[in-house]
Structure formats: C-alpha cells, structure tokens
Amino acid sequence: MPPEWEITFTTSILRAQINLAVLVESFKLGPSTTHLGMRSDLDDFIKAYTNVRTSKDGTYQDFLKEGNLRYKRGELFEAAAAYTRCVCLSAVGDVERAKALASRSAVLMSLGRFEESVIDSERALQHAYPEKLRFRLHLRKAQCYKELGQLLDAENEMRRTRELIAASQVSDEQKQEIADIAEKTFAGRCEVKTTRVRVEYTRPPELSFGTDALRPCLSTAVEIATSEKYGRHFIATRDLQTGDVMFKEEPAVCGLKSEVKWTHCAHCFRPSYTLYPCNTCNKVLFCCNECEKAASPYHEVICIPRKKYEDEFKAEYDLSENIFASFARIFDFLAFLGVENCANYDNPSHPRSERFRLLTEFLTLIHHPLPYEEQIKSLCSDIIKHCFQISDNAKVAKLAEFCNLALLKHNANSFSIEECFIYDQSDEIDLKHVAYGSYHVASLCNHSCDPNVVCTYYGKTMVGRTARPIKKGDQLFIRYCNLFYNLPKETRRERLSQYNFECDCDACRFDWPVAKLMAEDPSFFLGTDAPNLKNLARKESRTSGLAMKYVDIAAVETFELARMLQRAYFEPALHSRLDQMYKLIQMVIFYHWAVNTRTFTHDPNV
C-alpha cells in the first residue's frame, strides 16, 4: 500500500491503538475510474505521464508525495507513474525502493493487474522492506494468486501471512485482530477499479511476392534504382494493389524518446506497468528479465558512460534539454554498432561482422552539412573523454568524427517509431511517437506529400505497405513529414528544407488544397456504399487522427469497403480524389493497419 497508509496502519498495530472499522476500511480503495468500451488501460497509463512531473523537476520525496496524493484521489494510473519514478530515484536494496515497489504493487492490484502486482510485491520483499510489514505483501500476493485462480500459490502465501502475524511483536489480542482482518480480506474479492483490457501484440506480415536475395528486408516487387534527380530510390517491378507489403525492416540503431522512457521497455519498446531500472546505472528500464538479458550485449557498453553523461556531463556543460537529448543519441550509436566498429568506421581492413556491415550501410545514407559541425565534433570529443575511459587521443578523435557523422546521418534519415492509442474517453484514434530508428534500406525511399506507401510499426519492426494501386515502373514514395491534406505547400516546403530538396509531387506541382478547403462530397457518384463508410467516422478528430472505434476500424469489412471505394476513385479523373471523402478512405486504410498492430480483448480474470 502507499507509504502514507503504511505509516498509519503500522503505528496503529504497534502501539495497540487499533480501530477495527478504520482498519477494515483501510483495505479498500478510492473512487472508481471505470473505462468506457474496448479501451486499453495501458493507453491511460501512458497518458497519465502527461499529468506527472517531468524527469527534471522532481526528487524521490516529490514523486512519493504525488503518488500518495494521486492514490487517495483514485487517480490510479498517475499514482503508478509517480511510483515508477520513485523506483528509479532510489538505490538497489534500499528501503525507499522497497516501499515504492510495494506502493506500485497496491495500485496494480486495484487496476486488476494481478500478475504485475505479484512481481512488484516479490521485488519489494527482496529489498529492505520493513520486517514488521512483510505480512501485508504476502497477503497481497495471496489475494492476487486467488484472483488468478492459482489456489495452491494463494494458500502458500496466506500461510506465510499467518506465520508473520503470529511472529509479530504485539499482544495476542492484537495479533488476533490483525489475523481476523487478514482472513476476511483473503476471503473477499479484490475491488478492481477499471475494466481491464488485455493487449496482445500481433506479428508483422510477410513480404508480398517473396524476399529479395540481396536485401532480405525488401520484396522482390521492389528494385533500387539510381538517377541524377532522385538519387537512390524504389521502383515497382510489377503492378501492385493496396496492401502489398514492400519492405519489413529492423533498425540499425534505435532508442526511446526521453518522454516515454518511464513507460516503455528500453529493449522491446512495449509499454509496461512493472518497469525496473538497470541495477548499475538506474537510467534504463526494462519490462522483464528476458529483455534485460537480451539488451545486455549493447547496454553494458554504455551503462556507466550514460550514467556519467546524465548525472555529470549535462550539469558541467549546462546543456539545454533539446541539445542534451540530441547528444544522448551518441550512446545509442556506440552501443548498437559497437565502440570498436565506430572507431574503425573507415578502416577497410577492420574485421567484417554483422554490426560492422550495418554500420557501413548506415553511413552510406545521405546527410546534409551543417555550419556548426566543428562545434558538434568538439562536444562529441568532450562527451567521450568525460564518460568513456579511453586514454588513446587518436581513438577519441576518431570516435568524435564518427559521432558527428552519425548525428548528421540520423538527423537526415531517422524515422519516428509510432504506436496507436486513444484520446481520453472519446475513442479517437491517433499515433504517438515513442522512439526513433535508423532504417537504412527504407531511407532510400523518397518523399511525397501524397505517398503511395505508408509505414506502420510492430514494436521496432517497420512495415511498408502500398496505400493505393501502383503501376509497374512507378516510383514508391513514403512521407518524411506532413501530408498535403494537413498543411499548405509553403509550410510543407519549409519543413522539408532540412532535407535539402524541393518536393515535386503532384500535390506540390499542382498546389492541391488542404482538406478543410476540399469539397465534402465526391465529384462523381459512388452508389450507396459511400455513406456507410462516412457514417462510421462520426467526426473529424481534433488531431490528425480518426474518430472511429477500435472495433470498427480494425474490422476487415471496413477495410474492404475502403479498398472498394478507393478503386472507384481511380477510374474517373484525378481531380475526383481531391475531396474529403477520399481523405477518409485513405485514413481508414492506414489506421486499419496501425490499429491491427495490437489486439484488445476483455480480460476474463476481471
């Protein structure tokens, strides 16, 4: 339970000032926060972080106080978020970490996350959790096991609870009162305050038409061509239909965005309630032991250096948050690609390995010179000297050159890894940027403000699908920034200026209007099916998202209806696409894929 409740409860027991009614009431939880519809509580958990202090404005006591206050108000997701920060701001084996874990386990039980509550309770017991309070964690584990149907485990935990109560340093009468409360608690049901929805992550689809022999992430329906105007780019080798999978790629380098590092696992990028920090650096969090072990080959490389960077270097150089976050990418480059590989990035005699191959392919990507490259290189050198124990000045200089180059490549070629989520209780679907990744093959695909290929993410895996029919010999395009629907040409070109090219897609050449200036209805007859799709979308989202329910947009029938209408649009003249109905069709097709990266089902245990 939250520490504030612990103090009250413990003092009452040890000082023999027990009021039975108050004690029973203390086992109950605050006001209800019931969800509406098929909604993932993980979405609310992630959203809760927007209401919790940021990484730079809180101490352990700040987050502890905030967690307790949120818990009292029944703001359970925000409370769990605050207690996670407490875990990260406390030391391994310390009583503060034990109490933060115990507090989070209480919140998780009230959210119906019984498996996770058991994990945190066990972690708290492994730390310096006060001996006189340990019976409560065993009681909580017994309750959770009972709810999960693991009755033998529940009885074992209840037996341990009874043993600890019997061994406590209070009178026999007080022991009996405590034991009676524990038995009543165990006999009842946990009061779950949310409708829990189980989230399952789906596997990415297979490539259409087979796998390219030289580049396994590409379909055989794609070839890489080169021209003076477009540089390297993708060309279709056959006619393609909407939904064909053209590429499926893992990143050469990737990392979480700083604002979600407290809600997502640093290895698998999945959101988790039971994130636990690395015992050495306390800076990187993992969802389970398996992910921590899987991350060890690259995390161990930069574990201590990253800690020195975040704890010492930033303060010494007084870096702004934006600059600090940008240079944090250096550690991801060195970790994923290997320090020795990076120090020998231009050495043709360096041993060839898979990571060195990724590094060389990553460095073939285009980048654009910046006027302050020497300052970047100097700062990279200072970071490496400060954080890594490298005495060889030549090696430091070489690593600084690589880091400067890698930052430029990243700035020109990185992708925002997205996941689908819902706003508030409105069912509005949108995408949240949770990480970045450098996909060196997908980066060869050029930009269009009206792309014919769209990308969705299955964890770290990027999948590129055709968004409309494409003729053999046509170029494949993705988007680097906003679509023409959302912004006028001048604003789009200003945002694209960082890539040092001028877009000449049809939307730019013919200055197509933004969505709000388009006709609401199509300019030709579509029959009776058009209103059906339109009625599914109740209104325009307040964001770039789509105001449709998960179950509606995930349905195959909705997707097939959208594809049928899309084909009808390609028969008449091009101008027929420039209306709000066609925008809706394209959004339905895209969000169908985005939503289906995860499935949502009611948990039968709650």
Image (cartoon, rainbow, N blue to C red):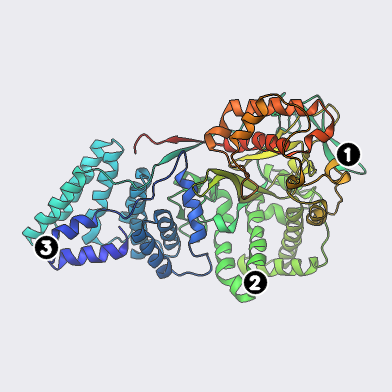
Q: Are marks 1 and 2 in contact (CB under 8 Å)?
A: no
Residue carrying label 3: 170
User: Where is residue 7 drawn, in percent x and y?
Assistant: 25, 66
Direction from residue 234 to residue 591 in the image, left or right: left
Local crowd size for mark 1, using a 10 Å CA cut-off: few (<14), some (14–19), many (≥20)? few
Q: Earlier in the sequence, mark 3 or mark 2?
A: 3
Find numbered disc 2 in the image and state the secondary structure of the residue it sits on. Answer: loop
Give the mark nearest the N terminus, 1 or 2. 1
Choose between 34 and 186: the one closer to the eye: 34
| Type of amino acid under label 2 | Leu
**What is the secondary structure assignment of the residue under circle 1?**
strand
Q: Nearer the viewer, residue 388 or 471?
A: 471
Quadrant location of the C terminus in the rendered image:
top left
Q: Position of residue 351 (x, y in %)?
A: 72, 46
In this rendering, is residue 219 above or below 546?
Answer: above
State the image coordinates of residue 229 (x, y, percent, origin top left). Answer: 91, 44
Q: Is residue 286 visible?
A: no
Residue at image point 43% right, 60% down: 82
The amino acid beneath tag 3 is Val
Q: Amino acid at mark 1?
A: Thr
Q: Earlier in the sequence, mark 3 or mark 1?
A: 3
Marks 3 and 2: CB-CB under 8 Å? Answer: no
Q: Quadrant of the N terminus?
A: bottom left
The residue at which mark 2 appears reads as 319
Query: Is any atom of residue 448 visible in this view?
Result: yes
Viewer-proximal residue, 587 or 440? 587
| Tag 3 and tag 1, C-beta contact below 8 Å | no
For the view shown, which residue lies furthest in the right direction? 228
Q: CA distance from mark 3 to mark 2?
A: 55 Å
Residue at the disc numbered 1: 226
